[in-house]
Amino acid sequence: RGPQALATKTTAMGRVSTTAKPTVTHVRGHEVVPESVLRKRKTLAEIKEKREETLAAQRVKRSNKPAAGALFKKAAAFVKDYRQKYASGTRLARESKKLRGLSDSDVEAKLVLVIRHKAGKNLDDTTKKILHVLRLYEMHTAAFVKATAATTKLLHLASPAVVFGVPTLKTVRDLIQKRGFAKVDKKRVALTDNQVIEDKLGDKGMVCLEDMINEIHTVGPSFKDANQLLLPFKLNPPKTRMKRDHSKDKVEKDDVNELVERMN
């Protein structure tokens, strides 16, 4: 049946005619809603209520879940961390004692190239701070350092994470020409235009790339300004594995110039 009721009426000729009665839409000022619509509304309300209960339970479960760094650790993990800290503390104390009487006159080289080859996962806090001072924030980055007694001590303390050595003029030139970048107006700019060097270091007597290369290689009076303009070099991972003498806890046996050729 439709929304309207049909009334039947027999005429004089014996025919049956149908007339539609008007549908009641309001009773005493209230709208009349069909029963099917009421049932549908009730079903949708029940579904919505169940869904809200499910979402609430999921939120409570997520809030009670421990954070990613606060998961349960086994006793072996604590033992491993303790042994690593103890070994790092012993190594730092040994290196500090060994280099206690070192002075600037004992340092032969003037320029040192430092390459970081280890990530910061298993490094102690002291080594991480030294890497931050050397501006080696990422793995496989390199930077020039003026060789002094203080920097030599830092390099030996951070020896498990870095390779360092005396670079040749060819190594200095290849690094600056191929991977040299400067920070200009908070942007990383490649050193392909001498105008950048002249604008930043013109008052120091450097107007081209060769002047900067010579100043860094000879560790001239304006070495600090030229080195601060240079951003740390981002190198490629070496094709072959680095060799390390673990017995003496020394720097890598690889020559730093040969290593740069493999990574540049």
Image (tube, rainbow, N blue to C red):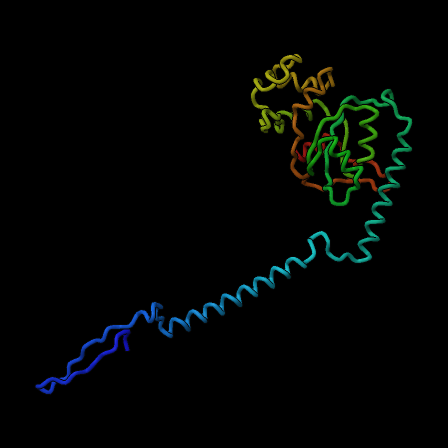
* 141 to the left or right of 83: left
Q: Quadrant of residue 22?
A: bottom left
In the image: residue 158, left or right of residue 138: right
Seen at 33% across and 71% down, the residue is 27
Q: Is residue 217 above or below residue 14?
A: above
Q: Position of residue 5 (x, y in %)?
A: 25, 77
Taking depth in this image into account, of 113 and 158 the one nearest to the observer is 158
Percent from the top left, x then y, of residue 95? 87, 35
Task: Name the residue at 57% across, 65% down.
Answer: 54
Q: Nearer the viewer, residue 174 or 136?
A: 136
Can you name the residue that lies furthest to the left here?
A: 13
Q: From the viewer's perspective, is residue 29 above or below residue 233? A: below
Residue under the image location 84 percent in, 53 percent down: 79
Q: Give x and y (percent) for residue 178.
A: 61, 28
Task: Residue 211: give x, y in percent of width and height.
Answer: 65, 16
Q: Quadrant of the C terminus?
A: top right
Residue 247 falls in image quadrant? top right
- State the count of labels: 0
Report the quarter where the N terminus lies. bottom left
